Amino acid sequence: MLFKQRFFSWFDSYDIYDEEGKVLFTVEGQPSWGHCLHILDSQGVHIGTVQQKVLTFLPKFELYAYGEYWGCLVKEFSLLFPRFTIDTSDWVIAGSFGEWEYTIESAGRGGIASISKELFQWTDTYVIDVTDPADALAALMTVLAIDAEKCSRN
């Protein structure tokens, strides 16, 4: 999947494309205290939400898929390499030193996805390589939360 932020937008908004350039998902931000991102499928149906929890020691984002709580992504304390976990799964998200590359690993299933930020783009652009298409929405929610966390720091 190719994750690309829209160039002119007041709030976070993204288009996510497949390998053939077709829009798979659209992401629309809404005004709120903290980031709140709504994920729509290619037909415009709401299928997911990423909601930042505010007033926490370490960044946390609640993830909802198809109206159900999917988990809470939590940034772990680390000095050089960012690391995140999800409370309802065995996924561990590990980032590189420059926070340009990430991997999502599962203790039970192995590699879930790899994420890389494309350099020299006008907007935030990520390539998300998901091993199992059934994990695409969850991987997308994870990337959205990580991008929102980075945006909150800047």
Image (cartoon, grey):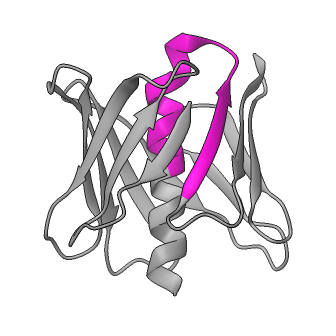
Q: Is 3 above or below relative to 59?
A: above
* Horizontal side of residue 110 vs 137, given as left or right: right
Q: Residue at x 29, y 66 (%)?
A: 35
Question: 136 or 62, which is in the foreground?
Answer: 136
Q: Is residue 88 visible in the rendered structure shown here?
A: no
Q: Residue at x 63, y 36 (%)?
A: 128
Q: How many marks?
A: 0
Check the image and name the residue furthest to the bottom: 154
Write down the quadrant of residue 95 in the picture: bottom right
Q: Is 119 above or below relative to 127?
A: below
Q: List x then y, in percent, for residue 42.
A: 26, 22
Q: Is residue 134 visible in the rendered structure shown here?
A: yes
Q: Is 145 above or below relative to 92?
A: below
Q: List x then y, in percent, for residue 81.
A: 82, 68
Q: Classify the position of the N terminus by image quarter.
A: top right
Q: List x then y, in percent, for residue 69.
A: 29, 34
Question: 36 or 14, which is in the foreground?
Answer: 14
Question: 28 or 37, which is in the foreground?
Answer: 28
Q: Which residues are magenta?
A: 125-143
In the image, residue 137 lies in the stretch drawn in magenta: yes
* Horizontal side of residue 86 vs 16, given as left or right: right
In the image, residue 32 lies in the stretch drawn in magenta: no
* Horizontal side of residue 19 vs 8, given as left or right: right
Q: Residue at x 20, y 72 (%)?
A: 10
Write down the quadrant of residue 56 in the picture: bottom left
